[in-house]
Amino acid sequence: MKSRAGPLLFLLSVAGCTASPQTVTQGPQIRRILEDDRYEWVTVETENTRIHFPSGSYAETQQSLLPARAEGSRRTVLSRLSVSEYQEPLHLFYVDSREDMENLTGSPVTGFSYYSDHAIATIFNDRWRAFERHELTHTVTLGTWTSPAGPAVVEGLATYVDGACGRYENGRIMRTFIDQESMISLEKLVGDFRQQDDLIAYLQAASTIEFVVHRQGPEALALLWDQGLQVSPALLQTSADVFQREFEVWLSSTYEPVPASAWESIRAGGCGIDARPAG
């Protein structure tokens, strides 16, 4: 993956893709990453996305699958957000490891959104699925919507749109939290989001949004974004205590818990692993 001769940008022509460097819109962060001489970047263009990965990376071995993956993630994000039009080309950077993410973003995270540049970076390897939908949700919402009402709705909405943890539906993980009596109060979830257990906080915020959308429809997303998850009980015309009880009943009646072995794997490895049993 290390560059041997400075930055090298390949433009490939693959099925369903074009190779026209003049059409590529590059913001300052995109240019900075592509000019990083630690990597030789391969770029594949599709109708709406620009896919970048280092030569020699795991993503390169999966490059035939990436166009459909990127375009599918874009469609899912826009559909779940009820966004009818999004004109800017999206840039997706796939890298192998947290070390790569730290090189590119300054932090060893598994995903990052440069929403002003309509770009994301995410880890993708044989043990970790890429969080395209999560990060693209940040790119679309933070780049085009009004200012959000706090981190709970920002991360909750992205996790809701992504929809899965350990290759299980988010709701199945939350059902397991209910069984273990690990739920967070709505007040703490909203008021002190960053201090909570990440796995619980992200998934509970996502499931809260899912519950409200189930009851009120997708138009509730804009209200939650503008006013915060704390307005969820009011949107359902109920009190906070009743909301919490109804939320837990809905989760329990809608989703089965994940198997114990999957739960242990997700707790240890995070949502990016595949915790489903083989076969």
Image (spheres, grey):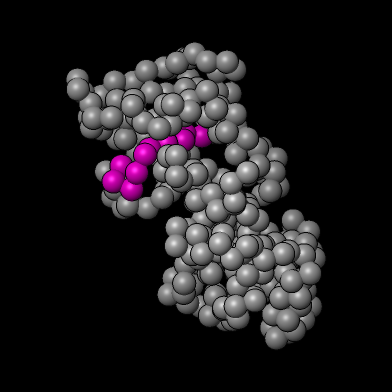
**Can residue 73 be seen at all in this image of the molecule?**
yes
Residue at image position (66%, 69%) is 175
Residue for point 41% across, 50% down: 110
Seen from the viewer's position, the closer of residues 160 and 269 is 269
Q: Residue at x 67, y 66 (%)?
A: 257
Q: Farthest residue in the front direction?
A: 279
* Image: 223 above or below 241: above
Which residue, as the protein is rendered here, is positioned at the far left? 5
Picture quadrant of residue 227: bottom right
What span is colored magenta in the figure? Answer: 90-100
Q: Nearer the viewer, residue 137 or 267?
A: 267
Q: How many marks?
A: 0
Judge whether residue 120 can be spotted in this image: no
Q: Position of residue 260 (x, y in %)?
A: 59, 66
Q: Position of residue 137 (x, y in %)?
A: 56, 48
Q: Say which quarter of the image contains residue 185.
A: bottom right
Image spot of residue 102 (x, y percent): 29, 48
- Name the residue at 44% across, 62% down: 268
The quadrant in which the C terminus is found is top right
Q: Indicate the position of residue 132 as horizontal and vertical percent values.
A: 52, 43
Quarter holding the N terminus? Answer: top left
Answer whether residue 124 is magenta in the image: no
Q: Relative to 121, say whether 11 is above or below.
A: above
Which corner quadrant of the image does residue 8 belong to? top left
Q: Nearer the viewer, residue 222 or 37?
A: 37
178 vs 82, nearest the viewer: 178
Taking 234 as reference, is 81 above or below it? above
Q: Is residue 254 left or right of residue 260?
A: right
Location of residue 238 with respect to 1 vertically, above or below: below
Q: Is residue 91 magenta?
A: yes
